[in-house]
Image: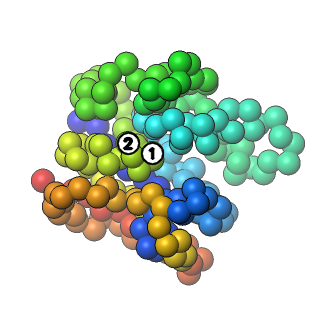
Amino acid sequence: MRSVTYSMNVSLDGYIVGPDGSFDWSAPDEDVFRFWIDAIRELGVYLMGRRLYETMLYWETAAQDPSLDDSQLKWIALWNPLPKVVFSTSLSAVEGNARLASGGLVEEIERLRAEPGEGDIAIGGATLAAQASAAGLIDEYRAIVYPVLVGGGIPFFPRHERRVDLELVETRTFNSKFVYLRHRVVR
């Protein structure tokens, strides 16, 4: 069965965006960017909400920018063909290799797990991840912790009253500055 993973950059105080909606503090350095390039190779499909979809639309046409470096071009070559499912009540169409979800998140994940296919089912965005977590559908939480306190905003971890026991599977430090944490849900 395909695993469901939730991966994001996160501030040390636990937020993916600050109280003003900004995430400029989470721009990856070269090592972290290469890490995300390697991580995307493990994916079979990427689930996201409207806000993250609109943020990631940049990559659909970014290859036309002559100032991009080799790492950014590698990311584009992997990201653009990756199948994506967008959950939105306000969008009527999406671009690239994306489709609008036809049903709810639980039904979509169950359908994707039942389909033949390789690669993890990744969830991006805290709101969607909170829904999946509340339904007990996330198998792994993966975070790159940035050395910044943003003081509020959208939390990485959902705020619901349910205990989830985790097992540390992997850690990694990048340039003595960023820390990757990978935890598996204990079932």
Graded by Cα atoms within 10 Å as few (under 14), some (14 to 19) or many (20 or more), the crowding at tag 2 reads some
Please give left or right for residue 58 compared with residue 186 in the image: right
- In the rendering, at what x and y percent does residue 40 appear? 50, 45
Please give left or right for residue 77 compared with residue 6 in the image: right
- Give the SS element for disc 2: helix
Please give left or right for residue 43 compared with residue 104 in the image: right
Q: Is residue 19 visible?
A: yes
**Distance of mark 1 from mark 2, alpha carbons?**
7 Å
186 vs 104, nearest the viewer: 104
Residue at the location (22% across, 65% down)? 167
Tally of numbered discs: 2
Residue extending farthest front: 20
The image quarter in which residue 112 lies: top left
Q: Quadrant of the N terminus?
A: top left
Query: Which residue does the numbered mark 1 point to in the structure image?
Result: 124
Contact flag, marks 1 and 2 (Cβ < 8 Å):
yes
Graded by Cα atoms within 10 Å as few (under 14), some (14 to 19) or many (20 or more), the crowding at tag 1 reads some
- In the rendering, at what x and y percent does residue 165 appear? 17, 63
Query: Which residue does the numbered mark 2 point to in the structure image?
Result: 128
Task: Report the amino acid beneath label 2.
Answer: Leu
- In the rendering, at what x and y percent does residue 100 appear? 46, 22
Task: Report the amino acid beneath label 1.
Answer: Gly
Q: Is residue 113 visible?
A: no
- In the rendering, at what x and y percent does residue 101 appear? 40, 23
